[in-house]
Amino acid sequence: MEVRLALPLILLAACLVAMALAHLGASREGLLQALLTFALAWAGLAAWWRKRKDGLRGAELDAATGLLAEPAFTRRLRAEMARLARGRTQCCLALVGLEASRDLDQHHGSGSQALLLQAAGRALLSLTRSVDAAGRLSEHRLALLLPDTGLEGGRAAAGKVLEGFGCEKLRLADGSLLGGIPLNVGVVQLKASGETLRQALDRAEAALALAQAKGRNQVEAQ
C-alpha cells in the first residue's frame, strides 16, 4: 500500500486509540505518548517507502546514461506491443546508433566515452514526451519508444533527435571539443499482430543499418 493511502488509516487508528485511552481514563501524558508513538511509526514508514521507491527506480536505470536499462525498456516495449494487439492506436520504435563512442577513450583520453554517454542520455531525455520511453540497449545503442505515433511521426521525432544531438557541445577528457554527437537513427512502426518483440527489434536494427550505410546523421524509417 502506498504511503499516501496508508496515512489516513494511520491517523484514524491514532484517533481511535486516543479515544479508547480517554474512555479508559488515561492521563494526558498517556494520550500524548500514544500519539507520539504513532507519529514516529508514520515517519519510519514514510522513510522506508521513499528508500524503497528510490531503490526500485535506480535498478531500472542505466548508470551511464540515466535512461532506462535494457530490461526495463524491454518491459515497456512488450507492454506497448500488447496494447497494440488489443487494437489500440499506433507506436514507433527508434534505435539510435552512437557513431562517435567507439575508441573515444583511446583517442581523447580516459573518461571521454562516459562523458559522451551522459550527454547523449541528457539530450535524448530532453527530446521525449511524458508518454515516451528512452533506454539504452547496448554499449552503442539507445532506443526510443513512441506510443500513439505513426511512421511519419516517428520520422519527425528522429529528425528532432538528430537536430538535438547536433546542438550538443561536449568537452572531452583531453580538453578537445566535440561539436555535436554524431549518430544514425532507424525507425519502424510496430505491427499490431504477427510480430514478436525480437522481430520488432530486428526490423529496427535493419533500418538503423540502412541509415548507417548512408553515412552519419541519417534517418531511415520503414
Image (cartoon, rainbow, N blue to C red):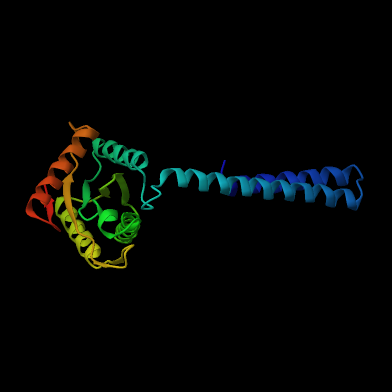
Q: Is residue 26 visible?
A: yes
Q: Is residue 63 left or right of residue 198?
A: right
Q: How many marks?
A: 0
Residue at the left extreme, as displayed: 214
Q: Quadrant location of residue 198? A: top left
Q: Residue at x 37, y 51 (%)?
A: 64
Q: Is residue 192 visible?
A: no
Q: Nearer the viewer, residue 175 or 165?
A: 175
Q: Quadrant location of residue 75? A: top left
Indicate the position of residue 204 as horizontal and vertical percent values.
17, 43
Q: Nearer the viewer, residue 11 or 202?
A: 202
Indicate the position of residue 4 as horizontal and vertical percent values.
58, 49
Indicate the position of residue 2 as horizontal and vertical percent values.
56, 44
Indicate the position of residue 141 as horizontal and vertical percent values.
25, 47
Q: Is residue 78 left or right of residue 29?
A: left
Quadrant including the N terminus: top right
Q: Residue at x 81, y 47 (%)?
A: 34
Q: Is residue 132 left or right of residue 42?
A: left
Q: Nearer the viewer, residue 89 or 119?
A: 119
Q: Quadrant location of residue 70? A: top left
Q: Is 75 above or below relative to 22?
A: above
Q: Is 11 above or below relative to 173?
A: above
Q: Is residue 185 left or right of residue 70?
A: left
Q: Residue at x 31, y 39 (%)?
A: 74
